[in-house]
Image (cartoon, rainbow, N blue to C red):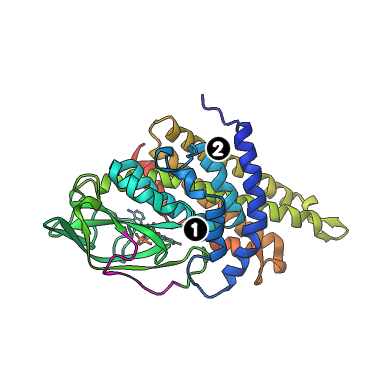
Amino acid sequence: MISFEPTEKQLAMQEHFRRLAVERLQTRSMQIDAAIPAGVDADYLAVIAEENLNAFLIPEAYGGRPLDRMSLAILFEELGAGCAGFAAVYAQTFHGIAALLIGGSEEQKKRFFPLLLPPGGHVASFCVTEEKSGSNTSSFSTFFNRKGRFFILRGEKNPVINAGHGRFYVVWANEEGTKNRSGISTFLIPEKTEGLRFGPYHDKPGFRPAPTATVHLENVCIPIDNMIGPAGSGYLLLMQTLDWGRALSAAIAVGLARAAIEEVIRFAKQRVILKRPIIRNQSIAFLLADLVTELEAARALVWRACRLIDIGKDHTVASSMAKLYASELAVRATTEGLLILGQSGYRRPSLMEKLHRDAQAFRIAEGTSHVQKLIISGQL
Ligand SMILES: Cc1cc2nc3c(=O)[nH]c(=O)nc-3n(C[C@H](O)[C@H](O)[C@H](O)COP(=O)(O)OP(=O)(O)OC[C@H]3O[C@@H](n4cnc5c(N)ncnc54)[C@H](O)[C@@H]3O)c2cc1C
């Protein structure tokens, strides 16, 4: 039996980050959303530094003060309610850290984890997707080959959150001449490495505060010590990293859905038509009843997946279920939200309109909803 009752400590943390989301993220997120895409916002990097957010992801031995997954789920939900884009910037750093935690050597952890700790707010990037391989990660067109004590990498990763800002880039590539899973390895590429170039920031509809761009690897040369795990272990490491990441991506989607549902409830209580608030219409009241019920269900799926990770049990399907359900709920909550808010939501700037654009990204990033169904149905 899994207990989902948050502890006093978790509740205090939740309250702290709920306030931070309102005070530091919500208003800023609307401003960044309306601006031309640029890099990671300076105010957001300041939040990462001041709150020492990356320390929550890093073991004590390397300077962190780590949280368990359940606590991280609570944290990510609050950040997602404040600004899904900010939470995505942080989540990508988590992916980089996760790959190192799972497959990295002691020496790599000592070298790379401190780069993410204050002073300063820092991020990392997770580089998997290519123009021709998004859902299919069984081979890549980014290639590596060994030259003495070095690996040379060439190819392109696109889209990549935090591109141009990462202290390091975790990159998946196939060994030259291979075209299958067993030829995939994972590499740590420090910022400012020669041959590492970035394209212009994409102008995308949602997640605008999470800047994405193409990462170009032009004969990037790194020491052989920068390969994570043994040669050929990259595919398994990617699957394990994604299994962790999806549970937390789902937590962000829960936060976004909650923000949307709270906004709809507020509006439905205030908007008076024919002398009564519209929430008194059963069609709207029942819809809200469905949404708050689904929100609880989504959160329970997220917490279950996180708890399974914490206790070292198989969590692949649980993470996919959480990601699938929470992503679809985020889209549904904001779609219904736009209907209920009417013309006051269907304009710019409007929180609901922004949440709706952000929500769509959850169905695609870190494995589409189709891919989650493939994973779940594959276990039937
Ligand atoms: C906002 C955003 C940020 C991102 N950030 C990053 C990042 O930082 N790093 C990174 O590496 N990637 C990133 N991605 C990429 C993301 O992981 C991919 O977009 C995702 O994996 C899907 O790949 P694709 O877009 O190429 O779609 P495709 O793989 O081309 O799929 C196209 C369609 O076919 C469907 N499909 C594919 N295969 C199957 C199948 N077997 N059965 C049924 N349907 C199928 C898909 O569900 C989709 O609907 C980001 C994406 C977004 C939207």
Foreground label between 2 and 1? 1
Figure quarter occupied by ligand 1 = bottom left
Instruction: Give the labeled residue for mark 1.
Output: 120
Q: Is 236 or 62 nearer to us in this picture?
A: 62
* Magenta stretch secondary structure, dominant: loop
Q: Residue at x 49, y 44 (%)?
A: 56
Asked which quadrant contains residue 106, the reply is top left
Distance, label 2 to label 1, CA atoms, is 35 Å
Q: Residue at x 35, y 37 (%)?
A: 379
In this rendering, position of residue 244 left or right of residue 33 = left
User: Percent from the top left, x then y, of residue 333?
Assistant: 61, 54
Instruction: Give the labeled residue for mark 2.
Output: 300
**Amino acid identity at mark 2:** Ala
Q: Residue at x 62, y 64 (%)?
A: 28
Asked which quadrant contains residue 317, the reply is top left
In this rendering, position of residue 208 left or right of residue 281 = left
Q: Which residues are magenta?
A: 190-202
- Quadrant (top left, top right, bottom left, bottom right) of the C terminus: top left
Farthest-out residue, top: 1
**Amino acid identity at mark 1:** Gly
Farthest-out residue, front: 119
In this rendering, position of residue 127 left or right of residue 78 = left
Secondary structure type for disc 1: loop
User: Percent from the top left, x then y, of residue 67?
Assistant: 50, 39
